[in-house]
Amino acid sequence: MAKPTVKAVLLSPQRELGAKPLLVVGPSLGTSTVLWSETAALLGDEYDVIGWDLPGHGISPAATEGLDVAELADAVVDLVDSVSPGARFHYAGVSLGGATGLQLGIKHGDRLRSLSVQCSGAKLGTPEGWLERAETVRKLGTPVMIQGSAERWFAKGFMDRQPEISSRLLHALRDADRFSYSFCCEALAAFDVREQLGSITVPTQAVAGVEDTVAPPSVAEEIVSGVRAGGTYAVAEALDGVGHLAPAEAPAVVAGLMRNFMKENGL
């Protein structure tokens, strides 16, 4: 395996970086920085918000070989160092982006100021399920996932209420590189940091959608329990009427929770 390369999109107003605290936000499998656009806009006056795309998604180059979640965390640190060398930063990520956040907390905790893990867990799904999906997408391409993802991603009625953002997210899935998507599935198949949560020393927030079938509130509570076991402050939040993509489904609520969490902890 080789460390993947990920590219960034500035989601806050154009200004000299460093004037505001840095907030880095990460995506769910199959999405892009579009996932964070509305939430970032609500936080952009207070933070420099940078979103990153998974390999083969959005603007990031395709992966040429397998990868793991720890290597994604390394790639995020490299990305930060390319724009603000050595900077400490707030981090928030959804699903695979949230798993990457847990690895940042475990492996690069000295670089973090706070951690918000959203619609994610220390283990997601089953290895068999992820490997089966990887093989399907490798053969048939990412469009084969659109219907199932639409059902998993969004709470009931969201696509009717917000057709533009849901369409943009599903188009990101359609346009993702099939091989990179499959490599990410294989990374999730191997991902399990439940026994390492106690090593996280940065204040941690776990956000879950009540209607999320992938990472329900019980999974967020598991993160919080594991982090607290190591003596670190952690809090769980459950959002009614929200599925698997909280920043897109409830941007004002998510922005408020993140803002309050960072300020309450003096960050």
Image (tube, grey):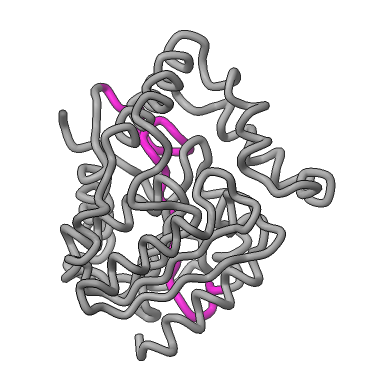
Q: In the rendered structure, which segment of residues is drawn in magenta?
A: 43-64
Residue at point 34%, 29% (across, down): 127
Q: Which quadrant, please, contains the C terminus?
A: bottom left
Residue 143 drawn in magenta: no
Residue at point 76%, 47% (across, down): 156
- Depth check: give the residue in front, 120 or 87: 120
Say if 27 sits above or below 143 in the image. Answer: below
Residue 226 coordinates in the image, percent (x, y): 29, 65
- Which SS type dominates the magenta stretch? loop
**Would residue 54 be found to the left or right of residue 85 on screen?**
right
Residue positioned most to the right: 160
Whether residue 236 is visible here, answered yes or no, is yes
- Depth check: give the residue in front, 142 or 13: 142
- Depth check: give the residue in front, 255 or 225: 225
Residue 52 drawn in magenta: yes
**Would residue 242 be found to the left or right of residue 21 on screen?**
right
Residue 148 coordinates in the image, percent (x, y): 63, 28
Say if 167 sits above or below 201 in the image. Answer: above
Image quadrant in which you'd find residue 57? top left
Residue positioned most to the top: 139
- Depth check: give the residue in front, 231 or 54: 231
**Would residue 83 be found to the left or right of residue 22 on screen?**
left
Residue 103 coordinates in the image, percent (x, y): 25, 54
Image quadrant in which you'd find residue 242? bottom right
